[in-house]
Image: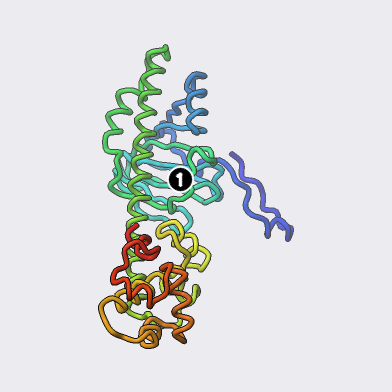
């Protein structure tokens, strides 16, 4: 594909790069590329599954391909050999068993490092069907469930037999298994990401509990999590069911409930301990959260059935 000459106009410099399909920068004649969808039946199947193109590369001697702004989500599974992959942060090593995830509108480049290499590549249309690909951080991931693919490809996909119904059916079956592996990989990556994020939320909760008297704000909470206030707002709603300051209030009220039931501390002392300027402000906040005043809660002798208790158990 020819590369257009640069446009020096100010408007062209300011606009976002035009998305494009991947192109070859270096391609040795010994390299072999086999696309899966050379038959109409495969084309129809792949379109329904959200695939624009898929295939297998057998690379030798010299190879480099990519785009500065991809119009598709690319998943590249390295089966043998070594490559280097750049998704906008410089070239990183990629060895057999690694998978490169390159979301649409991002750059991606792959180049051959070892004398030979082979791999499966899939270009997915952006859209709701594969929206999870857009949520994956671009980069190279190890230890994902693609180890079985090499034998599968050699058995079903790279052959010289006539493309009769049986052969096409075998290729569709193989593609289904590959797509299933992509789904499993996304589950693994996103699941690990959620687990890591939940650990960060746990750490934030522990910090709030140790500093209940602090003058917490959304900005301070976001800084503690090293994220933007808007992202923290979405994250606490999704994972905890409350807004950021709602989390602070919940932890303050839970501590206050413990003090009310287990000590004879005055309301003024409890209010100060959990970060309220006055007993009146504390009592009003407590009633909104627990459904009764602090004095009524203490007189009941237990917290079962309160809104705060119910939230804490979720």
Q: Is residue 60 visible?
A: no
Name the residue located 42 percent from the left edge and 70 percent from the top edge. 292
Name the residue located 34 percent from the left edge and 37 percent from the top edge. 181
Front position in the image: 147 or 26: 147
Say few, some or many: other residues with alpha carbon within 10 Å of mark 1 (under 14 / 14 to 19 / 20 or more). many
Task: Quadrant for the N terminus, please.
Answer: top right
Instruction: Residue 302: give x, y in percent of width and height.
Output: 29, 69
Residue 162, relative to residue 86: is it above or below? above
Front position in the image: 191 or 87: 191
Give the color scheme: rainbow, by chain, secondary structure or one colour.
Answer: rainbow
Residue 311, relative to residue 255: is it above or below? above
Secondary-structure class at tag 1: helix
Q: Quadrant of residue 197?
A: bottom left
Name the residue located 36 percent from the left edge and 55 percent from the top edge. 193
Instruction: Residue 159: give x, y in percent of width and height.
Output: 36, 20
Residue 180, relative to residue 26: is it above or below? above
Residue 65, relative to residue 198: is it above or below? above
Mark 1 sits on what residue? 133
Q: Is residue 302 visible?
A: yes
Instruction: Please state if 65 lies on the left or on the right of 189 as rendered.
Output: right
Task: Quadrant for the C terminus, please.
Answer: bottom left
Instruction: Residue 10: give x, y in percent of width and height.
Output: 73, 61
């Amino acid at each position: 594909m020819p590369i257009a000459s640069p446009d020096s106009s100010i408007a062209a410099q300011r606009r976002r790069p035009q998305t494009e399909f991947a192109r070859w920068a270096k391609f040795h004649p010994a390299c072999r590329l086999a696309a899966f969808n050379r038959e109409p039946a495969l084309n129809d199947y792949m379109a329904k599954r959200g695939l624009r193109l898929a295939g297998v590369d057998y690379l030798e001697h010299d190879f480099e391909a990519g785009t500065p702004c991809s119009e598709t989500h690319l998943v590249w599974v390295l089966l043998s050999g070594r490559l280097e992959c750049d998704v906008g942060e410089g070239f990183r090593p990629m060895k057999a068993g690694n998978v490169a995830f390159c979301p649409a509108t991002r750059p991606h480049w792959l180049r051959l490092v070892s004398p030979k290499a082979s791999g499966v590549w899939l270009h997915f249309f952006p859209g709701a069907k594969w929206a999870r690909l857009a949520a994956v951080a671009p980069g190279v991931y190890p230890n994902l469930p693609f180890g079985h693919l090499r034998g599968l490809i050699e058995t079903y996909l790279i052959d010289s037999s006539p493309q009769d119904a049986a052969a096409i059916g075998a290729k569709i079956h193989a593609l289904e298994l590959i797509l299933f592996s992509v789904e499993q990989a996304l589950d693994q990556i996103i699941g690990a990401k959620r687990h890591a994020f939940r650990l960060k939320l746990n750490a934030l909760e522990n910090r709030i509990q140790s500093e209940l008297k602090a003058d917490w704000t959304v900005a301070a909470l976001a800084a503690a999590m090293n994220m933007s206030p808007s992202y923290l707002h979405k994250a606490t709603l999704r994972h905890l069911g409350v807004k950021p300051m709602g989390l602070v209030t919940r932890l303050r009220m839970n501590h206050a409930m413990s003090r009310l039931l287990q000590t004879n501390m005055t309301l003024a002392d409890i209010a100060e301990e959990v970060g309220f300027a006055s007993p009146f402000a504390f009592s009003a906040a407590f009633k909104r959260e627990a459904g009764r005043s602090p004095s009524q809660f203490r007189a009941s002798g237990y917290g079962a059935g309160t809104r705060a208790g119910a939230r804490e158990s979720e």
